[in-house]
Amino acid sequence: MKNCQKNKTPIKVLLIPSSGEKGSGETLNAIQIINFLSERVENISFHIALHKNSPFIKNFDCDVILTEKTPTDSDEILIPETRKIKPNFSFFIGAGSSKLFRASKKTGSFNIFISYSKEMRARGLKLNRIMNIDFHLVDQYESSLPKLRLSERIKCLFFNKSKPHYLGPIFQTCSLIKKNNTLKKYNLTAGNYILVSLGSGGDKNQNNQYYNEIIHENLCKLKEKNQIKVLHIFGKAFPLKIPEGNNDHICIDFMTPNEFICLLESAKFAIINGGGTLSQAISLNTPTLSCAITPDQPDRVNAFENMGLTKSFIPEGDFTDVILSFNTKNIKENLQRSKNLNSLEQIFRIISFKNKSL
């Protein structure tokens, strides 16, 4: 346990990530927050709310509170549980009703709200939430989102609340030993493979075809034209059978978030959606071909492309030429000039500071 903070009083942490049957990046972020804090803080316990059909339930060995509906719509379960737990810190990761924020605050919790998009950020600045949020962290680069509206800035000033903090994506950095072990596990060589990930894997286009299927079809065509290895992570919410791969085209459903970061950092480039993974790749200086597959992603992809930090593509038809012609050099140079951000260290500093007053 490195840089371990010792506590006489047990610290109780409640996590409320956006959670459903498909799984979500918010739940993966909860895994990383728990792993990160577990390594650095002694005498700490975790409680997390998840949808009863979440594909990630088995990834948690802490207290799991199962909900019939999404955590945001489960006040009847989570408010009594929150009062019973009396958390020292509550993480609302893209989720949580205004009543649950208020109930958590009344127990004495330090409430941290994590948003990912302009819509979610605006939700955290509504009058029924802003008063019960102690720290609003945006899991994105500030340049990827529009500026706060005047009314939002006035609310922060009037209620003496700091504006949302843009601290970058949430991920655990990899040690050299961990990175090498992960590369060996998947029989990969740093800089000599393409990593492919479309988040949870459950997103479909207007023709009811899964984006993962479209990407896979193109990657199969690519094998005939290119010798580089491919690692395709389909995601736990991909409902179809994972295609059979081989040594040069590895197909899997899931890997731990820390393994994923190790391999994202070591890839020649990545083919990803416009979610949180895009911000992670930018922080790791990994060139990306990115596509927007959900309504909140086009603005983010366009913003990063305008800064020269990614190249966008449309996941339709045959786009093998886009992959083959992808020039990573210019993007790599732009990435090396950009600011690398990671929210986890800041989260640890907040808990360390606030814990002194517990």
Image (tube, rainbow, N blue to C red):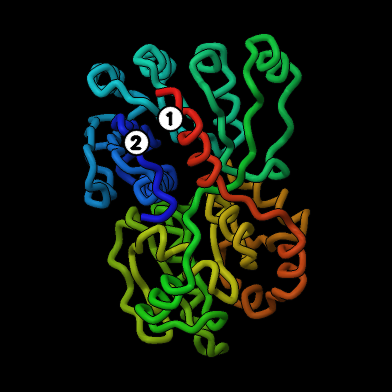
Image point (40%, 36%), residue name: 18
Image point (51%, 21%), residue name: 133
Image point (63%, 34%), residue name: 165
Residue beneath label 1, please? 355
333 sits left or right of 25 in the view? right
Count of number-bearing discs: 2
Looking at the image, residue 338 lies above or below residue 242: above
Query: In which quadrant will I find the N terminus?
Result: bottom left
- The residue lying toward the viewer, choosing from 332 and 314, is 332
Q: Quadrant of residue 44?
A: top left
SS of the residue at dot 2? Answer: loop
- The residue lying toward the viewer, choosing from 39 and 274, is 39
Residue furthest to the top? 158
Judge whether residue 24 can be spotted in this image.
no
Mark 2 and mark 1 residues within 8 Å of each other at the beta carbon: yes
Q: Amino acid at mark 1?
A: Asn
Q: Whole-percent x and y of residue 145? A: 68, 39
Residue beneath label 2, please? 7
- Tell me which label, 2 or 1, sits earlier in the chain: 2
